[in-house]
Amino acid sequence: MTKGVFDADRVIFLLPGGKGTHTELGMALAKNKKIIIHSKSPHSFSLCDETVAFYHREDVFQLTCSLINIADVVESTLVEQS
């Protein structure tokens, strides 16, 4: 888990994540990785009592789409970020 995050240029997190998701997210943030967080529902990113503050950092890209379209959307997002 640690090596994969440290070696990656970009890290994509698929929500809902498992127990290690937020640990990996913290590692990616500490290493200044480019981060994309995906959720099929915009509710994961809404500001409420369950909000995860790290999801709302300026250096974290929130992505909401179906898993079927994720490869195309991520590819176009990466082109826009370059």
Image (spheres, rainbow, N blue to C red):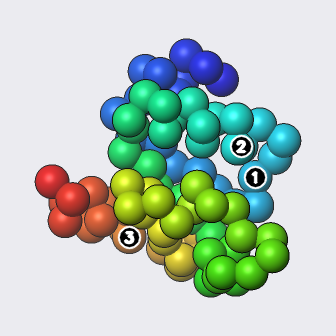
In this picture, residue 57 sits left or right of residue 74: right
- Tell us which disc is closer to us: 3 or 2: 2
Q: Quadrant of the C terminus?
A: bottom left
Q: Residue furthest right?
A: 19
Furthest residue to the top? 3
- Quadrant housing residue 46: bottom right
Residue 65 rendering spot, x and y as whole percentages: 53, 78
Q: Earlier in the sequence, mark 3 or mark 1?
A: 1
Residue at image mark 1: 17
The residue identified by callout 2 is 21
Identify the residue at horizontal 62%, vertical 75% (top origin): 45
Q: Residues within 10 Å of mark 3 (few under 14, many from 20)?
A: some
Amino acid of disc 2: Thr
- Left or right: 48 with respect to 69? right
Rendered image quadrant of residue 15 = bottom right
**Residue 54 image position (x, y, % from top left):** 58, 55
Residue 24 falls left or right of residue 11: right
Residue type at tag 1: Gly
* Element assignment for label 3: helix
